[in-house]
Amino acid sequence: FFVAFLRRVCTSAVPAGCTSAARAQPEPFVAPVDLMAKRRRGDGAPITSDDLYPAACVSASCQALQQEVDAALDCTISTSLSSLNSLACALAEAGETAALVRVWDALGGSKGASPATWLAVEALHARPKHLLPGSGALRLPAQSVRALPPARRLHKICKGRRMSARSAGAQEHVANGLAWVAAQRAAGRSLEAGGGRARSLLAKELRKALGINLEIARGLVTTLKRKKVL
């Protein structure tokens, strides 16, 4: 009697027409939390789908960018510096890193880049690495020589500018740096700047001794090494 009762209860719990296979289907999983909302950008704002998937150019806008890139990379067509700068900004905003570095070369690199272009390029470089697309939606002509991957080339461009600014800022402190090194050696100290950690420690000492910021101090260490003082 008890077994028969259980059978009636189980049968009544399933709507008519449902098979045993249908009854065995699990409920669809619904994520209890939006995992994306837990992640933050460098500025503290939550990462959105636009950050995870940079606005790839589509339809008409993609065609327009493609035409501009084709013209910029065509050596038979003369493109003005202002047009190249505008194109570079648009490519940076669209996350088209591969096309950007090609147009960067056509622009003449840092010599032809406008302040607005630098801002756009550095904003792209500031994106987390996993948000930099490996290849964009734009078609590019083949290169005859081997080139760095686009993301790596972008890093080199931005790092080069930073190193240049650091070196320029260190120039006015070279005399004081030389005097400090001479005083340390006169006191019998051996200064080591052969490795990254040693250079970092030396930069911190120079920052404190000369009253300069750490970035300038790092540039000063590099300058003194080039002069073979360290």
Image (cartoon, helix red, strand yellow):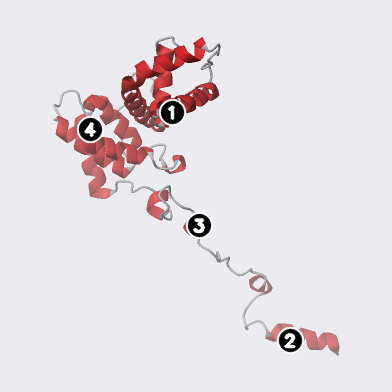
Q: From this view, report whether residue 57 is shown above or below residue 200.
A: below
User: Which residue carries the number 4 mark?
Assistant: 70
Q: Residues within 10 Å of mark 3 (few under 14, many from 20)?
A: few
The earlier-in-sequence mark between 2 and 1 is 2
Distance CA(mark 2)–CA(mark 3): 44 Å
Measured along the vertical axis of the image, is residue 146 above or below residue 99?
above
Q: Is residue 171 left or right of residue 84?
A: right
Q: Earlier in the sequence, mark 4 or mark 3?
A: 3
Number of the front mark, 4 or 3: 3
Residue 156, image quadrant = top left
Tell me the residue that label 2 is attached to.
Answer: 9
Q: CA distance from mark 3 to mark 1?
A: 38 Å
**What amino acid type should be assigned to the residue bearing mark 1?**
Arg
Return the x and y of residue 84 as percentages of the image width and height. 19, 33
Which secondary structure, mark 4?
Answer: helix
Q: Which residue is mark 3?
A: 38
Q: Earlier in the sequence, mark 2 or mark 3?
A: 2
| Disc 4 from disc 2: Cα separation | 72 Å
Point out residue 22 in the picture as x, y percentages from the top left corner.
63, 72
Mark sitting earlier along the chain (3/1): 3
What type is the residue that disc 2 sits on?
Val
Tag 1 residue: 207
Query: Image quadrant for the N terminus?
Result: bottom right
Q: Earlier in the sequence, mark 4 or mark 1?
A: 4
| Residue 183 makes an appearance in the image | yes
Between 203 and 54, the one lying in front of the other is 203
How far is disc 4 from disc 1 in space, using C-alphas?
49 Å
